[in-house]
Image (cartoon, rainbow, N blue to C red):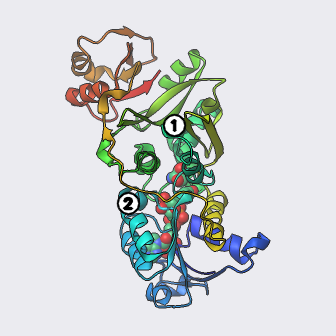
Amino acid sequence: MKIGLLGCGVVGSGVYEIISQNMSPMVEDFEVVKGLVKTPEEKILPYMTNDASEIFDNPEIDTIVEAMGGIHPAYEFITRALNAGKNVVTANKAVVAKHLNEFTTLAEVKGVKFMYEASVGGGVPWIKSLRQAMRIDEVTHIGGVFNGTTNLILSEMEEKGLSFDECLKTAQKMGYAEADPTADIDGIDVRNKLIISTSIAVKKQVQAEEIMTYGIRAIAPCDLKYFKSLNKHVRLYAEAVIEDGKYCCRIEPCLFDVDQPEAGIKLNYNICSLYGKTIGTLKYIGQGAGKLPTANAIVQDLLDIDGGNTALPKLCFGGDAQCGMSMLEGCYYVRYSADVADKLEAAFDGVEKTAVEVEGAKAFVTASIPTISLHDRIESAGVGVMDVFVTRI
Ligand code: NDP
Ligand code: HSE
């Protein structure tokens, strides 16, 4: 297999390392012919180029690995490769979440493979497992801690009492964070991963605006202190339920009892779970971010392409499930600054709630309410993003 690598950063360099160092006898016949970077000529290594035509105009290259990130020019490069009859493997959840249907259909028409295992759960073999589960079951629940950066932040703040910024810096240094880490901390990266997973499960391209999303930007030590007093750990949790022709998706900080598997997920680890009628619950745990685990997932896709793995069913997009925003509910911890107390408390007028003691701030816990109602109420309060922090409890 002759590979053109688009992007030689954290992930791309991991792919190059596994292949060029022959880390497995199974990759002996693989060769990275060229790797694309943005860096000016004088700084790049011999296998690299900053001229995309050196990859696209090389007829020897049969497979493209895209590990650049972002929508443009990743979208153009992926469609160009598929149109030219080249297989594509990508780790880029942002572009896959937006164009999964289009890429899958185009690859089918062109008789090539489009694979994206690394885009969700990094090294965790989640996409294949989800698609495999769907050979027998309809998947009715998807759940998971799908982001290594926020998981490192939450678990290190909890365990070591470190600050949010210190933990984010560590995640960046380790190569876990996105180029713009707001995608991690505001839940956008998880949203892309949930879009991909749910689109597979409902056989339809799910849209970003259908996913109720909160991130962890506003978490403070007082929140963690309160959660500790409950003997619980907080994780940024993504969830989709699919029932009676409808689906509903949410991403939010969520509390887990210390003995639940999600509570034990630390650092860059992810947990990805599904429920199907005959298989019951399946949970997969592994490194969700990082150079070699993610590169491993890409090389596994390359091996499947090379070996002609056709055991998974064709991914079709004829599903007619509708988004039902009010299917999910929960009890919520809402912590807010005294400055916005009037607005926020007014927005929750009529909701049964109990005030809780939190150091230096105001907080209450609601009775079970629809998640969409929580979002509507907080939006109607018109408070700043740092003024309020919510967690499902
Ligand atoms: P990096 O920023 O480390 O690397 C990006 C690479 O792409 C760099 O080599 C960069 O060139 C190159 N590049 C970016 N834009 C262009 C462009 N327009 N033209 C040419 N080259 C370009 O990112 P990561 O390796 O961390 O991430 C890559 C993708 O993998 C992203 O989609 C990310 O979401 C995904 N991913 C990342 C994981 C991780 O743990 N890091 C895990 C799972 C998925 P240069 O070096 O010159 O800047
Ligand atoms: N930024 C992502 C994370 C990379 O932290 O999980 C892996 O998708």
Residue count near mark 1 (Cα–Cα under 10 Å), binned few <14, some 14–19, many ≥20: many
Residue at position x 75%, y 75% from top?
21
Who is closer to the viewer here, 328 or 131? Answer: 131
According to the image, label 2 marks what residue? Answer: 101
For residue 372, side relative to residue 290 (left or right): left
Would you say residue 249 is visible in this rendering?
Answer: yes
Q: Give the Cα distance between marks 1 and 2.
A: 22 Å
Q: Secondary structure at mark 2?
A: helix
- Above or below, 97 against 250 in this view is below
Q: Residue 322 placed where, x, y %?
A: 30, 40
Image location of residue 351, percent across then percent down:
28, 12
- The residue at 48%/23% (across/down) is 222
Q: Nearer the viewer, residue 83 or 269?
A: 83
* Nearest to viewer (mark 1 / mark 2): 2
Q: Residue furthest right?
A: 25
Mark 1 vs 2: CB contact within 8 A: no
Q: Residue at x 41, y 45 (%)?
A: 202
Tag 1: amino acid = Gly
In the displayed structure, 123 sits above or below 251; it is: below
Look at the image and tell me in which quarter the N terminus lies. bottom right
Out of 197 and 226, give the one closest to the viewer.
197
Whole-percent x, y for residue 168 in the image: 52, 46
Residue at 27% across / 18% down in the picture?
341
Q: Is mark 1 within 8 Å of ligand 2?
A: no
Q: Is residue 363 left or right of residue 278?
A: left
Q: Secondary structure at mark 1?
A: strand
Q: Tell me if I can see residue 220 in this picture.
A: no
Q: How far across and down, in percent of the image, does residue 138 sit?
A: 49, 40
Q: What is the tally of numbered marks visible in this picture?
A: 2
Q: Is mark 2 within 8 Å of ligand 1?
A: no
N-terminal of the two: label 1 or label 2? 2
Q: To which residue does mark 1 refer?
A: 143
